[in-house]
Image (spheres, helix red, strand yellow):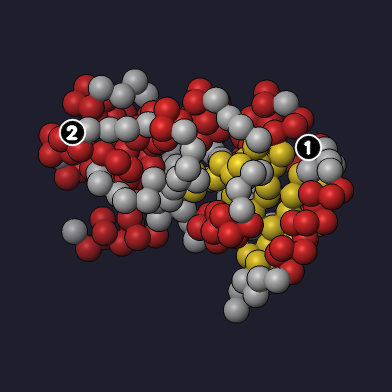
Amino acid sequence: MNRLTVFACESQPITLEGLAKLLSECDDLEYIGSASNLTEALEALRQRHPDIILVDQAAGLKMVFQFIADVRNTSARCQPVLWVNDLAEIDCFRALQLGARGILKKTLPVESVIECLRSVGRGNVWIESSMPEHVIGSCDRRWAPRLTPREKEIVHHVCAGLKNKEIAEALTITAGTVKVHLMHIFEKTGVKDRFELAVHGRRMLGIEHAGEMNRAETEKEITTA
């Protein structure tokens, strides 16, 4: 069995000790170390190539957001998960925009931590389902029938965290065509930008679990359509 490797950027030793113990009890997850600051974490990322990196928000959101962007630019493999005490709606959108694949509250039970890591490791975007309604958002499912099949494919890929260029490659169209489709989707649904769409799109398309969206299954659906 291939184990998902997990690295943490966290300054509290007791938190790291608990995380290491938790992951040691999982056959499919492996804790491979930690860094106490973002600079050390980025260097460790280049050397150790973890599958998932847990990033504590304590360093300050501005620096953490830059770190998430750096991770996405440095490694196509590593999936950032933002580890928070709480997060405002606008910051949730920003984290998704920059490439976070999970937003995980530290107050959650250990089962949810494991669920998040496994979900992200499978290629999902994970937002825990008990977040306040204003963060997850609500969408009128009457919007979905207004979208064309191609527009729904675009929404699925946005929910999976893909950028315009990646969506274009997946659908064998140009990035400019993706932008045109997104403009039509915004007009039909009333969402303001692609980041609101990433959060709200799951409910728009009737995906039951607000916390995750599987990229592999989405691409399979598109391939076989």
Residue 171 appears in the picture as rendered:
no
Q: Which of marks 2 and 1 is in front?
A: 2
User: Residue 12: percent from the left, percent from the top?
Assistant: 84, 43
Q: Residue 143 carries which label?
A: 2
Instruction: Using the numbered discs, state the Cα–Cα distance from disc 2 to disc 1 in whole angstroms.
Output: 41 Å
Q: Can residue 143 be seen in this view?
A: yes
The numbered disc on residue 201 is none
Pointer 2 local density, CA inside 10 Å: few below 14, some 14–19, many at least 20: some
Amino acid type for the residue under numbered disc 2 = Trp
Left or right for 30, reference 170: right
Q: Where is residue 105 in the image (x, y as percent from the top left)?
A: 61, 42
* Position of 148 relative to 78 (above/below): above
The residue at the point 37 percent across, 24 percent down is 193
Counting residues from the start of the chain, the first of labels 2 and 1 encountered is 1
Q: Residues within 10 Å of mark 1 (few under 14, many from 20)?
A: some
Q: Position of residue 181 (x, y in %)?
A: 24, 32
**Is residue 197 or residue 15 the one in the foreground?**
15
Across and down, in percent, residue 20 comes to 77, 60
Total number of numbered discs in the rendering: 2
Residue at 28 percent across and 33 percent down: it is: 139
Residue with the mark numbered 1 = 38
- Would residue 95 appear left or right of 187 to someone viewing this image? right
Given residues 4 and 47, the one toward you in this image is 4
Q: Which quarter of the image is occupied by the C terminus?
A: bottom left
- Image quadrant where residue 195 sits: top left
Q: Which amino acid does label 1 sit on?
A: Leu
Question: In the image, is residue 146 above or below residue 211?
Answer: above
Q: In which quarter of the image is the N terminus?
A: bottom right
